[in-house]
Image: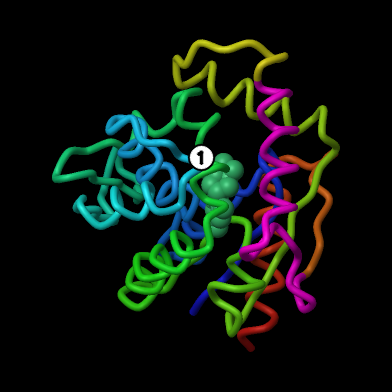
Amino acid sequence: MIVTIDGPAGAGKSTVARLVAEMLGISYLDSGAIYRTLTLACLERKVDIENEEEVLEVLESINLEFKEENRKGRKFFACYLNGRDVSEEIRTSEVSEAVSVVAKHKKVREKMLYYQHKFAHEHDVVCDGRDMGSFVFKDAEFKFFLTAHPSVRAERRYRELIEKGIKTTLEEVKENIIFRDTTDSNRDASPLVAAPDAIWIDTTELKPEEVAETIVSFVRKGMK
Ligand code: DC
């Protein structure tokens, strides 16, 4: 089974997707983390991330692994770069600032399909991202698109980062969200867009648990 949850940064996708995966007893595929891991490799190699060929060269020379692990009693989407666990490192503001640029390249996106399809082939998944329902898993059984007011999205992201001990300001997070919304929505290769058959949920006034329950009830009804 594949459940897709797409939407802009800060719409609550990852928190909701994790909850839905737990409630349904299936796995969580974090597609943003896959792009973030490649971005970290590009930053470490100091390549020009605007240059598609340079990014592709990095992708071809590294070893990426994405595994489900059990951490603190919960399922966790772990990211490895050349055997090194980078699951925490990929959340820094340096990576957040660069990731939309890395993710806009068409050939890079094509190559990244492999990791997403592989993981979904091995597990039943709830996946979150920008093009899960519209492109990567067009045949998914259940598709959702989350939105929320931009100021609420920025505040959520800010709190999430502070809780993780990452230094930032609300202003910086707001600017990053606006930049990523624009880049992710306007790129040529599978831009952020809702699949025509996705169910829209505005999460501005909702708690993650409420959104997750709504999604799970749609899935359970659809499974009957
Ligand atoms: O979900 P996130 O904030 O971790 O995603 C980081 C970036 O990765 C996002 O700004 C755009 C890119 N991304 C993408 O292009 N396609 C996806 N399916 C997921 C993320």
Residue 109 rendering spot, x and y as whole percentages: 48, 62
Q: Left or right: where does residue 216 sit relative to residue 162?
A: right
**Residue 56 is drawn in which quadrant?**
bottom left
- The boundaries of the magenta stretch are 173-198
Look at the numbered disc 1 and give the secondary structure of its residue: helix
Q: Nearer the viewer, residue 86 or 102?
A: 102
Dot 1 amino acid type: Val
Q: Is residue 190 magenta?
A: yes
Instruction: Report the label total.
Output: 1
Residue 65 rendering spot, x and y as whole percentages: 24, 55
- Kindly identify which residue carries mark 1: 99
Q: Nearer the viewer, residue 14 or 71?
A: 14
**Would residue 19 be seen by someone viewing this image from the given angle?**
no
Q: Is residue 182 magenta?
A: yes
Q: Is mark 1 within 8 Å of ligand 1?
A: yes
- The image quadrant where one finds the C terminus is bottom right
* Residue occupying image coordinates x 70% and y 65%: 144
* Residue occupying image coordinates x 30% and y 75%: 122
Q: Left or right: where does residue 13 sit relative to residue 83?
A: right
* Residue occupying image coordinates x 75% and y 72%: 198
